[in-house]
Image: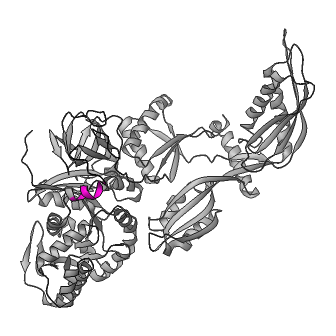
Amino acid sequence: MSEKVKSGSRNIAIVGPYLSGKTSLLESLLFVTGAIFRKGNIKEGTTLGDSAKEAHERHMGVEISTASTEYNDIRFTFVDCPGSVEFAQEAYNALIGVDAAIIVCEPINERVLTLAPLFKFLDDWEIPHMLFVNKMDRANIHVLETLHSLKSVSSRPLVAHQYPIMQGQQLIGFIDLVTEEAYHYHQGAPAVHIPFPEELKQEEQMARVEMLEALADFDDHLLEELLEDIEPPQQEILKDLKMELGADLVVPVFFGVAEKDYGVRPLLEALLREAPEPETTAQRRLEKQTGNQPLAQVLKTFYTPQGGKLSLVRVWQGQLTDGMTLNGVRPGGLYRLMGQQTQSVNKVSAGEIVALSRMEGINTGDTLQQETQPELPKAKQLEPVYALAITPEKRNDEVKLSSAINRLLEEDPSLGWEQHGDTHEVILWGQGEIHLQVTLDRLRNKYNLPMTTHLPQVPYKETIRNSIDSVHGRYKHQSGGHGQFGDVYLDIQPLSRGEGFNFNETIIGGVVPKQYIPGVEMGVRDFLSHGPLGFPVVDVAVTLTNGSYHSVDSSEQAFKLAARLAMQEGLPQGSPALLEPIVTVEVNTPNEFTSKVMQLLSGRRGQILGYEGIHDWQGWDNITAYLPQAEMQNFIVELRSQTLGVGSFHWKFDHLQEVPDKVAGRILTNSEEAITNGNGKNRKK
């Protein structure tokens, strides 16, 4: 398939919080460049982005979507990323493959903090980014106040590229701070040049001086011009904007209303002039240049009903051609994506983002190559923070579940699943309640696997507080022919927390023959899987001290059953105690919410261990605490509620701890009710 050779390309991610208008901006960018002839509507589900059924039902993005367009002989590939924090992994995986990002936000001071994790990721990876303040027709604060608030969440200086012209609360035009020319917006058409509004001269000058001073921090020549009151040439300003944006030193700011196409054309022009070329991005990202050998990286994995597996890749180096082999796998095809539509191509060059089909065994983040080269860095995989236990509605579907979930994990690496060894539940892990509901919808819609769900059982354990000596267990059974006889005496002692289980024997004189002692240990271990309170028993030592046998009727099985009887008799006498898993949790939060988060932890029976500022994230604290695992099941939901959605945590199991009597009583009552109602059968297996 022959194509007109383009003089360049740009790969631009569109990112921002939920409801900021990212999908509307993508529609507008495609519309004003002629890639589409009619803009879609989010409520009607007709947009090119957010086209999955799960996205339509929620009116929100749940995975990335890509679309290409051409503007002034440059091919732009836009990657629209979901805004919900629960789908942040999607955005992070895609961002490492773009040349620049557009952060879309609303002019609402109270929501500015929701941008902080995104700014942090972009700056950590040194990804150039611009800011598009959308929905300016709803702005209820002054533009300078908006900029001041936004600066609080960016470690890079924000540089206003234009000054908006407002009429009341309506955006009607802008002043270009580089050229100092004014323009008036007209819906459905390019902005029209108008005389400079003199009433805005003072405010415009303040914004322009601030822009120039920010650029001068990185350009000594520009600084000298400003100190000598020399007006810098426009080309010098544009050159500085391009260089400093490309080096992720400044963040240019634009204003607009995407639904009306206001501000979209100036944004496109800035991307054309100032966004770094793919070659520049590759030089920054690749630590070692390896000639012109093909080198690509997987940004996203899709499983589509029509084409099967698609791997969205950024080509960093060389060319990809139809039929070539990468990582030992030959792709089934090479495609450009336009939403869910595919366009077959024969070859693509470095700097493009395309899809490869049927790349079996290839995962998101993988480096694709023909010759062995260093692996490209991947975005950090987010740890799961919310779980549901799942069971297929139809029992026959259990055999299909593993394969379907593994495919979902290929598409979304921020998911996880396990079959818990203690509770025997299949547990699905993710980034929040909505994230898991979307995953369950995909299981139903894509794989015809409807699920029933409930919160996972807490893997409680139990132990004993007191020692029990010389517990007797005798098993005697006669049924004609050889009978069964085993006779044991056991000492049972509690161990320190975390020591597990010890088995010893002090048999003298062969009263229990050595060949039967393993059977005693098996019987003890078998009973410990389900103690007197109904949970696995830990931190006990059992010693076989005495017993007797029958020369004909004794067997290993008989001694196993005798040991079970002894344990059944003895453990209830040791003052059983319920143990719960305690995890170490590290919470990251803006310091204005630190006290609230500490109250949240304390209110969930947490023990605060301390907190300190995060050294590379100004204004954020890290709080460390012990927290019962039982109190974590909805912790992420409340944490996000308390922190405008930006609080996060990491956790790991630390130790087992005795449950307070009042709490233990409630747990045991609920456990008995579950067994009575037939819901506890899995735990008793």
Q: Compared with residue 243, is residue 49 higher up or lower down, i.e. above or below? A: above
Report the magenta stretch's main SS. Answer: helix
Q: Residue at x 30, y 81 (%)?
A: 141
Q: Residue at x 25, y 39 (%)?
A: 356
Does residue 307 appear to the left or right of 495 in the view shown? left
Q: Is residue 614 visible?
A: yes
Q: Position of residue 563 (x, y in %)?
A: 82, 30
Residue 275 falls in which quadrant of the image?
bottom left
Task: Tell me the quadrant of the picture where the C terminus can be found.
Answer: top right
Q: Nearer the viewer, residue 640 or 538?
A: 538
Residue 337 magenta-drawn? no
Q: Nearer the viewer, residue 161 or 58?
A: 161
Q: Compared with residue 193, is residue 627 higher up or lower down, i.e. above or below? A: above
Q: Position of residue 371 (x, y in %)?
A: 28, 39
Residue 154 falls in which quadrant of the image?
bottom left
Q: Position of residue 114 (x, y in %)?
A: 39, 67
Does residue 8 appear to the left or right of 661 in the view shown? left
Task: Tell me the quadrant of the picture where the N terminus can be found.
Answer: top left
Q: Residue at x 13, y 90 (%)?
A: 198
Residue 282 magenta-drawn? yes
Q: Nearer the viewer, residue 668 or 610?
A: 610
The total of numbered circles placed on residues is 0
Does residue 73 appear to the left or right of 659 in the view shown? left
User: What is the residue that sits farthest to the top in this orientation?
Assistant: 481
What residue range appears in magenta?
280-287
Q: Position of residue 646 (x, y in %)?
A: 44, 65
